[in-house]
Image: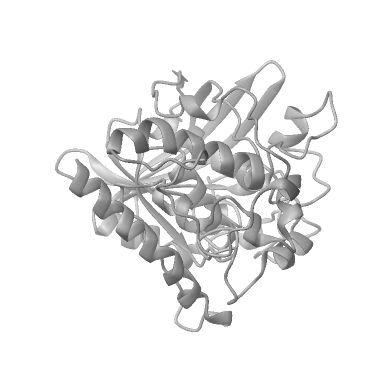
Amino acid sequence: MLRKVVWLAWLGVTMAALVAAEWDFPPPERLPSRPGLPDPLVMWDGSKVATPQDWFQKRVPELRALFQHYMYGRIPAPLPVHAKELYRNTQAFDGRGTLREVALHIGEKEVNLTVHVLLAIPNQRNGKVPAFVGMNFGGNHTLVDDPNVQLPTVWMYPNRPGVVNNRATEAGRGRDKNVWNLDLAISRGYAVATFYNGEIQPDHPEAQAGLLPQLFRDRPRRPTDTATIAAWAWGIHRVVDYLVTVPELDAKRIAVVGHSRLGKTALLAGAFDERLALIIPHQAGCGGTAPSRGKIGESVQAINDRFPYWFNGQFKQFNRAVEKLPFDQHCLIALCAPRPVLLTNAVKTPGQIPLANSTCLWPPTQFIAFLVLKA
């Protein structure tokens, strides 16, 4: 078995704004009421964004700070990534693709995580290929029949295939292969990289493993601290650190995908990392692609009541005062510009979520027109 260790350092400069000085924003109760969707082109001080330079140099860092402070919590600073290939099958998918499993060892000293990335690459290619990256809900072993792909050893969702007492078993192997359709992706010339979200942070309010317990082991958590969706987005960024070093992949054509809570994660990851060239949040709903001020679908209070650990402590203060949010989800979509965002939904989505998503689409469309006309 081929084994190699690759040292990965942070090469990009686009995420420098993530680790900022302490923000001087007022508590939620002191924010003014804004019943309508806030204008992405109006700065915190009330001045207008007049040029693309104003947007990218001033408003983008400001909006990122606002989203972290009042909703998602801080996205942690990048950490070093070591990549070690565990398995390679060059004749996967009836010889049409190569399947790799790579262990990413993230961090050093106080923070250490291991994430297993399943990477499928087409064998027939002319030059570098575009890639999709996204988290899965059931573990990499559920996406292929290959017995060499390792079972996760962390907490698992109880309703996933083959899970017994929140642990993965062989009974789940290959059970979700028709969900991700790796075979179809490589047949169309795309690579796919995926990993289990629970290896970054278990989706459980009392989780004692993952990134967050390590970040806050020495102090109580603050209302603005990193929450679970922000931790998952950080995990996607670390996997991208690895993907941009893979010689078969086109580092300028990496798309991020995700469904439901992981759709929320995909949008947040894309809004904070320009290396993600296309953002595809599927059925991301409240806290993702649907407006917090909307009257359709799940409300801010409902999602905070069900999943309080997904968002930071500040966000709960808007349960009955969403009009005080200094942004809405159309601003998160706008942060992805000029990169494309594709919002998708199932045909029979409950709660008319597609209609809610459309509310968030029009303002960014106007905004992109602003960028084009002012450039």
Q: Measured along the vertical axis of the image, is residue 182 above or below residue 14?
A: below
Q: Quadrant of residue 156?
A: bottom right
Q: Quadrant of residue 150?
A: top right
Residue 286 lies, in percent from the top left, at 59, 64
Q: Is residue 152 visible?
A: no
Residue 220 lies, in percent from the top left, at 85, 31
Q: Nearer the viewer, residue 212 or 223?
A: 223
In the displayed structure image, the side of residue 31 where residue 255 appears, left or right: left
Residue 284 lies, in percent from the top left, at 53, 63
Residue 27 lies, in percent from the top left, at 73, 42
Residue in the picture at 59% in, 48% down? 196
Residue in the picture at 21% in, 38% down? 128
| Quadrant holding the C terminus | top left
Number of numbered discs on residues: 0
**Furthest residue toward left:** 126
Residue in the picture at 65% in, 65% down? 161
Q: Nearer the viewer, residue 153 or 366?
A: 366
Q: Is residue 161 visible?
A: yes
In the displayed structure image, the side of residue 254 where residue 25 appears, left or right: right
Q: Nearer the viewer, residue 362 or 336?
A: 362
**Furthest residue toward front:** 46
